[in-house]
Amino acid sequence: MQILQIREPTALASASVVSGRVQAASIPEAPTMDKVTSQPPLYPTSGPEYRPVVTLNGWSLPWRMNGDWKEFHLVAEPVVREFAEGMKAHLWGYNGQSPGPTIEAVEGDKVRIFVTNKLPEYTTVHWHGMILPCGMDGVGGLTQPHINPGKTFLYEFELKHSGTFMYHPHADEMVQMAMGMMGMFVVLAMGEMEMPLPDNTLPMMTGSGQFGPIEMGGMFTVMKIREGMARDDYSDPGPYTFPKGTVAYQIETPAEEPLRQDGSPRSESTKKNMKGMKSTKNKGART
Ligand SMILES: [Cu+2]
């Protein structure tokens, strides 16, 4: 919030507190990145000192100060990323890259994020896990109108809690996220953390459980709670011991191969076509 000085004498009397968005008429520059190597972090030029994060094979989105608002500009757009020499993937991302640039700010900051849509379809940006007003949560159709191609929306909110968050669309999710639209949003804590980071958690996207990797579809942070753990004990109690017979399991299929819908076995020619595929025959052990 800022007090606007309005020059017209008639308006002076009614000069009032207005939303930050009135100030936002000039859209900040949208930096873009063409390199896929880790870029140096951005040190704060105002506000509290902190040690910025380094995004591996990525970069941090520059911002500008406008009054007490930190302004960022994300551009959702098709991008080309070279994963290995000569292997270029046509993706969707933000500001020239996929994943999008890391947004970094400090607990208590007021952020204003401009989002310009240069995709061939509508989008939104959801600030995953962050505590903010419902109408800033970026769920197309539910909490805001979609951002149509060529349009720019503003998100304005105060960063209430520190943490490592992410942003991604909540619009045509299965396509847009699969195409690479996501980025990290790091909110640094002011002062001491009240609690050590528990190693008793599995962070989303990077965790592995006792049955294999835990994937994005889960989007979970899994806190391990066990009977008998001491209060304030955040040590990792290890994998959960499932009671016997309570885990979904694979069975040996009685038929050698599935029948077709009409009940006939697959023909030899079909088998030949399927030559490259192996049938999995894992022993389904019941725990
Ligand atoms: Cu999410």
Image: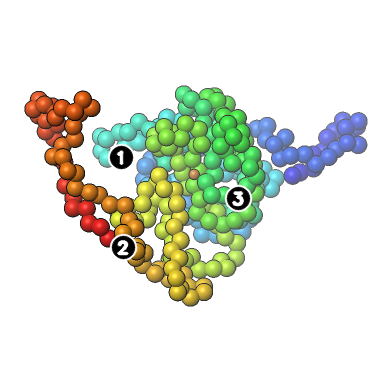
Q: Nearer the viewer, mark 2 or mark 1?
A: 2
Between discs 2 and 1, the one toward the N terminus: 1
**Residue 95 seen from this side:** no
Q: In the drawing, does residue 57 fall left or right of residue 147? A: left
Residue placed under numbered mark 2 in the picture? 244
Task: Determine crowd level at label 3: few under 14, some 14-19, many 20+ residues with C-alpha closer than 10 A.
Answer: some
**For the point 18% across and 53% down, which residue is it?**
283
Residue 31 screen position, x and y as percent = 50, 37
Check the picture and name the quadrant holding the C terminus.
Answer: bottom left
Residue 35 screen position, x and y as percent = 38, 40
**As shown in the figure, which amino acid type bears the numbered disc 2?**
Lys
In the foreground, 244 or 132: 244
Residue placed under numbered mark 1 in the picture? 83
Q: In the drawing, does residue 210 fall left or right of residue 142? A: left
In the foreground, 269 or 116: 269
Residue placed under numbered mark 3 in the picture? 131
Q: Nearer the viewer, mark 3 or mark 1?
A: 3
Q: Are marks 2 and 1 in contact (CB under 8 Å)?
A: no
Between discs 3 and 2, the one toward the N terminus: 3
Check the picture and name the quadrant holding the N terminus.
Answer: top right
Residue 172 screen position, x and y as percent = 47, 31
**Helix or strand or loop: what does disc 2 sit on?**
loop
Q: Nearer the viewer, mark 3 or mark 2?
A: 2
- Identify the residue at the far front of this view: 263
**Quadrant of res 89:** top left
**As shown in the figure, which amino acid type bears the numbered disc 3?**
Ile
